[in-house]
Image: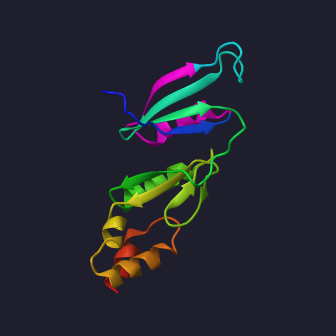
Amino acid sequence: MTTPKITPCIWTDSWIEDAANFYVSVFKDAKILEKSHYGEGGPQPKGSVLTMILEIKGQRLMLLNGGPLYKLSPAFSLSVSTEDQAETDYYWRALLEDGGRPSQCGWLADRFGLSWQIVPKRLPQLLGDPDRAKAQRVLAAMLQMQKIDVAALEKAAAS
């Protein structure tokens, strides 16, 4: 496999290994590809983890143990396209486990503060419907949701 030209880098504090292990447990095909450590003279103790490269659903992510200087924000999120309601429910529950916070329109922040969008593939199909009135009803329904409910979207589209 060739190394991608662009890999999102997520600044972490001291939770780098916990986060990597959590993401690998949630996403069954995920794996840790690389791990590097601080040497002498770094901002973190010698031997502590500097970076971890993960692959989740074919996407590489770098976690950087940079310390407490920067915090995560919903301005950056990872979007997970799901096949159906069951898969949507699985990722929603798993990523909220042990202290995550739900938001609206399919967004949540996991216990580390990383924002995710859990998006059933049916949502963009309905939002892109050429019948703009139907698409607007779907949008209005979605704006009332935390976790996306595909059946409720379909009902809004049909009404």
Q: How many marks?
A: 0
Picture quarter containing residue 16? top right
Which residue is painted at 39% across and 74% down in the image? Answer: 153
- The span shown in magenta is 14-36
Q: Name the spot of residue 6 as percent of width and height, x first.
A: 42, 37
Q: Is residue 78 left or right of residue 86?
A: right
Which residue is painted at 66% across and 32% down in the image? Answer: 66
Q: Foreground: 151 or 105?
A: 105
Q: In the figure, 60 relative to 100: above or below?
A: above
Residue farthest toward the front in the current orientation of the protein = 5
Picture quarter containing residue 137? bottom left
Q: Is residue 114 magenta?
A: no
**The C terminus - image quarter:** bottom left
Figure colour scheme: rainbow
Q: Name the spot of residue 96 as percent of width and height, x first.
A: 57, 52
Q: Foreground: 116 or 97?
A: 116
Which residue is painted at 40% across and 75% down in the image? Answer: 152
Q: Foreground: 19 or 28?
A: 19
Q: Is residue 130 left or right of residue 107?
A: left
Q: Is residue 62 left or right of residue 131?
A: right
Q: Name the spot of residue 103 as percent of width and height, x first.
A: 58, 63
